Image: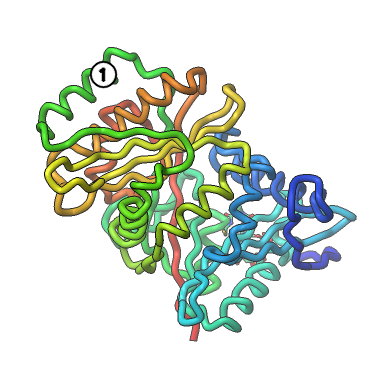
Amino acid sequence: MSSIRYEIDELAIPAAPQAPGWPDFDAANRLRNAVEAEAYGTTDLELTAEELLPGWLNQRWEPKRLLVARADGRIVGRGHYETLPEDSAVHAWLAAEVLPAYRRHGVGSALFDRLENLARAAGRRVQLVYAPSPDAPGERLPSPTGFGSVPLGNPEVRFLRARGYHLEQVVRASRLALPVHSAQLHRLREDAAAQAGPDYSVLQWVDRTPPEWLPDLALLYTRMSTDAPSAGLAEPERLWTPERLAQEQQMAAAGPRTALTSAVLHGPSGHLVGFTELDVPAEPGRAASQEDTLVLREHRGHRLGMLLKAANLEFLAERRPGHPSVITYNAEENRHMLSVNEAIGFVPMGYEGAWRRDAH
Ligand SMILES: CC(C)(COP(=O)(O)OP(=O)(O)OC[C@H]1O[C@@H](n2cnc3c(N)ncnc32)[C@H](O)[C@@H]1OP(=O)(O)O)[C@@H](O)C(=O)NCCC(=O)NCCS
């Protein structure tokens, strides 16, 4: 390993766009975008610093820390630490990116040493990493789920294995080219509605959840954290209360993106039993992002997943037409969700490995 001079420090999160600390925060985010674009071969996943800021300011429910590596007078690496607010929590989510020209000089290791030390000091002994793995020829490392694999010779795979991380799951990123033909979308929705029957109907809203539905949505969000397949990662429950939901939505509304939600109302019980959300940038030339989708277990098997997805894509076409694509991530073993997405027209655009290390 040849040596370069670099320093690692922690950034204070700016209170608002252009507030003190903004240029470094913005530079760290641009680095994140550049490395992700390299991994996926597309700029579809780019997020602006303004868009990410509300998430960084959400320290109460999703505490996070941002490290940077500086060399030659600029930011050449970024480290990301996130955990849960409860003192008793044992999970931390870690990530690092290094600019290609600065790799193989120990910067990634130095960032990860710091991130793992932060986790250890806080008693977060289960350390999870989601890392994009671009396709490459050669030997593969299969996911223990039996679904998907990553190229064994990739830098991130070698890096994480050398540090004691184990591959637990492969996640598929998929892209839907827009517009979907409106007649096709309508037919998918109508077929799903016919199969679901008259007990179920769709409600839709933009950004803030109507107050009367906050308790139901809080339950759905909580279930999302435990019901999505998380293989050997043992992703923890994230507890949502109506208060948290309202406050987070208020914070998100201060950012430039718009959330479009479709939910399914179960008439006989008067409760929402499923929801799906699209997160839409202000600029029509950029991709929208498919966020959570969940149908409560006791209401599965009624085509509500397709009903929700088709309805929300119609909502997007009606309220915010012109975006080129929708991006979504699903566990490679999540056949039910993948089948819905494939029927709508999503195609794979890349894969991520989900890795776990148990510190002593
Ligand atoms: C993975 C990544 C962070 C590594 O950063 P880095 O600064 O190059 O890492 P280091 O120089 O500290 O490498 C440490 C060890 O990882 C392994 N490694 C890293 N890159 C490798 C490569 N291209 N080929 C083989 N082994 C590699 C080696 O064991 C290396 O030790 P060595 O150089 O003494 O042989 C960097 O490649 C990157 O930013 N990739 C894109 C983002 C990403 O995938 N992050 C993964 C974690 S979230």
Image quarter for ligand 1: bottom right
Residue at 66%, 62% in the rendered image:
79
Rendered location of residue 241, percent (x, y): 40, 61
Query: 322 and 108: which one is in front?
Result: 322
Image location of residue 19, percent across then percent down: 81, 50
- Would residue 149 appear left or right of 11 to someone viewing this image? left
Residue 3: % across, % down: 82, 66
Image position of 72 (left or right of 201):
right
Tell me which residue sits at (34%, 36%) in the image. 262
Image position of 253 with respect to 318: above or below: below
Say if disc 1 is inside 8 Å of ligand 1.
Answer: no
Up-down relation of residue 76 to residue 311 (above or below): below
Q: Secondary structure at mark 1?
A: helix
Relative height, residue 3 to residue 221 (above, below): below
Quarter of image, res 193: top left
Write down the residue under mark 1: 186
Residue at 27% across / 42% down in the picture? 337
Q: Which residue in the rendered view is the most extreme toward the front? A: 212
Number of marks in picture:
1
Q: Is residue 296 left or right of residue 357?
A: left
325 on left or right of 215: right
Is residue 349 visible to the viewer in this orientation of the structure? no
User: As shown in the figure, which amino acid type bears the numbered disc 1?
Assistant: His
Which part of the image, by quadrant, shows the N terminus? bottom right
Mark 1 surroundings within 10 Å by alpha-carbon count, few (fewer than 14), some (14 through 19), many (20 or more): some
Residue at 29% x, 32% y: name it.
342
Quadrant position of residue 58: bottom right
Going by the picture, which residue comes out furthest to the bottom?
Answer: 360
Q: Closer to the camera, 168 or 18?
A: 18
